[in-house]
Image (cartoon, helix red, strand yellow):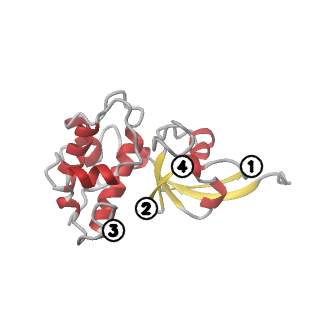
Amino acid sequence: MSDPRTVGVSVTVNGEAHRLDLDPRVSLLDLLRLHLDLTGSKKGCNQGACGACTVLLDGERVNACLVLAVSCDGQEVTTIEGIGTPEALAPIQDAFIEHDGFQCGYCTPGQILSSVALMDEAARGLPSVIDVDAPPCSAAELSDEEISERMSGNICRCGAYPGIRKAIHAVASGAASTSRVASGAAQPATA
């Protein structure tokens, strides 16, 4: 007999299906970290202000600390563990290393997931506050200002922003190293 205080939730995380009975107050972040032992997504402010917990929910970036796990029933979640492996990094992970896009690394998983999402958003022609009145630009045409605006929900207390922007430029323009690219891992956004 199931606990009447819990709710059944089915989610697919990094391609693997899970069925859990959860307290309805559990956040997506706590589902990932405490119930599935996926600790790549970090608990920073736990208020949606820092972006350290950014994950992709059905391909769209969200702050996992602000999303109730029960609202994710039937959805697909991608965490940092799902976009590359230590042996075969995704292009954006490789670019973060090459361009020194991290320092302490605590915010890096959220920065990388947000980078993947912003390149996808630009490739789909979704405007930002910067270009809402201008024709949308492609991922390859992203300016520093555009990248900064689109990444503004992710805070890096070490100040690695120049390296992060360089990494995003490298992948978005197709100039990133592909030496460690895994098949099936996130691929560079194209125009």
Q: Quadrant of residue 34?
A: top right
Q: Residue at x 63, y 60 (%)?
A: 71
Separation (CA) of disc 2 from disc 3: 14 Å
Mark 4 burial class by Cα count in 10 Å: few <14, some 14-19, many 20+:
many
Which disc, if any, is residue 126? 3
- Report the residue marked by disc 1: 23
Residue position marked by numbered label 2 in the rendering: 59
Local secondary structure at mark 1? loop
- Compare marks 4 and 1 and give the one earlier in the sequence: 1
Label 1 is placed on what type of residue?
Asp
Q: Is residue 128 above or below residue 39?
A: below
Q: Amino acid at mark 2?
A: Gly
Q: Which mark is residue 154?
A: none
Q: Nearer the viewer, residue 105 or 32?
A: 105
The mark lying in front, picked from 3 and 1, is 3
Q: Upstream in the sequence, badge 4 or badge 2?
A: 2
Q: Nearer the viewer, mark 4 or mark 2?
A: 4
